Amino acid sequence: MGLQNPGQMKLHSGGIVWKRQGGGKLIEVDKSDIEGVTWMKVPKTNQLGVQIKDGLYYKFTGFRDQDVVSLTNFFQSTCGITVREKQLSVSGRNWGEVDLNGNMLAFMVGSKQAFEVSLADVSQTQLQGKNDVILEFHVDDTTGANEVFRSRIMSMADVGAGGEDAVVTFESIAILTPRGRYIVELHMSFLRLQGQANDFKIQYSSVVRLFLLPKSNQPHTFVIISLDPPIRKGQTLYPHIVMQFESDYVVQSELAMNEDLYNTKYKDKLELSYKALIHEVFTTILRGLSGAKVTKPGKFRSCQDGYAVKSSLKAEDGILYPLEKSFFFLPKPPTLILHEEIDYVEFERHAAGGSNMHYFDLLIRLKSEQEHLFRNIQRNEYHNLYEFISSKGLKIMNLGDGQPTAGIKKVLENDDDDAVDPHLERIKNAAGDDESDEEDSDFVADKDDEGSPTDDSGGDDSDASKSGEEKEARAKKEIKKDLPPKASTSKKKPKDDEDGKKKKQKKKKDPNAPKRAMSGFMFFSKLERENLKKTNPGISFTDVGRVLGEKWKKMSAEEKEPYEAKAREDKQRYKDEISGYKNTQPMNIDSANVTDSA
């Protein structure tokens, strides 16, 4: 069925609006422009087809069976449009009739449709013999538009025979995604990236936005071209082209454009010659030709007066740019997160002790329930990040609270390393106050219940069950053990580790403690496990978990919703019970003014 873009559809009395998930161009169809609407049953779901009077044909896939009736009634009563039902031929016959409707070609077997193609994707057609017609398509869509589409663009743009020539060319540009060095040509209606192994041709109609983002304390500047639809290299899609320019490199460029065309179309957008920094010249010319808007850094400043903070996403180190309407992580994987898609953000501490005490993590949870964890952010960036996020009205969650915990703010306000020794304070607290262990473990238990991965797990979800409670409790017991003999050495640590583990195993859980909340998958497994055992007698415990996990991954968001609803109710139940069971210990991040940059 080709490339599918997830998004949201809104139907109203005036027509249809579809918005792609993650941002991009809207598809708006006015009621008066609709020529026909069809339903078709396709594998696993239903497809809604909307025929437009100018020949375009939109297909929306992912509707449930119950949606068909409600949407059919809506089109009939509100828009006055009768919805037709189309059936898909599955007989396997390869003879039938050809139906041309607008820009769509359908092959019909009887009254059922075998397949259909868009004529806009046809690059060439030929007659072969007396009765055969050959249609040729693109071998790889990354090579750009087909000849028919290119001819139409040239005729509409009135560029004449000179349209083949590039307006300006930039040699040997470093592109980080897709990686390589390319010759970048800017034409009237498209840009071209020519590398040793790849050749991309991108229509300006696919350019959604440009980003011009300087790197902190480095002589380079990022220029990002956001695309919709993305380009493809093999099986990999690239929605963002990440270019890297030398910040202080000056270039002089002349535009290869005749004066008549310049005066009629580009006089207010471009100049015929430029002499400036290369990233500014490139962005200015591309913006003038494509009409795309340029986003630059906003009000955020890091502790070193930069535009971004260093962090890690998954296994990749990079830079996180807090922008006025989004967050952008670069260079790999380039990840754009719009503010309007964010449900909440959460600051997470690292386990005390060692080099990790100088860092914290930032968790961003989207309304779609997807999460992005930006790890290893320097501790002295907390104030700037917190103030910026607060000013944007984004919800900040720590242990279910809408405000940051007092422990973070209080400790981070202390910038004097010599005034307080955090390590010494922890030793004193561990030796003199037995309640600190319990309070810290309660904090981490709550945090695990919120679904946040542990910081020491390296991002592996399978380690999430081994919470910071076990690690911190063990570490503090080791400190208690080491405190009386003042001249303890590192040789004793392995033995202490073993003793700590043994003691941890003997620790009994409070029977009065509230039962932790269950996830949506746990509710699903609880319901389906017995059915699976009945249908598969003798199945092993490991295979049960594997099969249930595969079923859960294949389920749609709508199918998961009943279980997720139960999980949300159980989560609220646990919050209410734990708040009455024991007060939560505030988060505590040791303070130090870390000025070194990794």
Image (spheres, grey):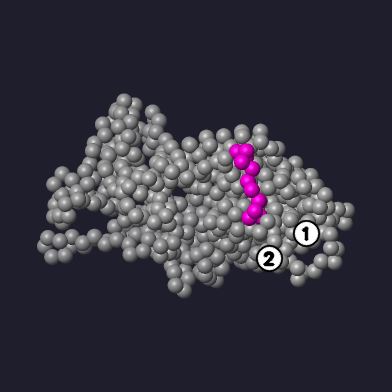
**Precedes in sequence: disc 2 or disc 1:** 2
- Residue beneath disc 1: 481
Q: Residue at x 70, y 37 (%)?
A: 583
| In magenta segment, residue 512 | yes
Q: Is residue 58 left or right of residue 455?
A: left
Front residue of 101 and 254:
101
Between residues 515 and 145, which one lies in front from this camera angle? Answer: 515
Is residue 462 inside the magenta stretch? no
Prevailing secondary structure of the magenta residues: loop
Identify the secondary structure beneath mark 1: helix
Q: Is residue 426 above or below residue 194?
A: above
Position of 248 relative to 468 (above/below):
below
In the image, taking residue 477 as reference, residue 97 lies left or right, namely left
What amino acid type is highlighted by mark number 1? Lys
- Disc 2 to disc 1, C-alpha distance: 50 Å
Tell me if I can see residue 41 in this picture.
yes
Residue 219 is labelled as 2
199 vs 366, nearest the viewer:
366
Tell us which disc is closer to us: 2 or 1. Answer: 1
Q: Are marks 2 and 1 in contact (CB under 8 Å)?
A: no
Q: How many marks?
A: 2
Q: Secondary structure at mark 2?
A: loop
What's drawn in magenta, residue-wise?
504-514
Q: Is residue 153 visible?
A: no
Identify the residue at the far bottom of this view. 196
Q: Can you give x and y, in whole percent of width and height, for residue 586 in the image? A: 73, 43
Question: What residue appears at the point 36 percent right and 64 percent down from the top-left corner?
Answer: 140
Residue 45, percent across and down? 32, 44
Classify residue 160 as left or right of residue 171.
left
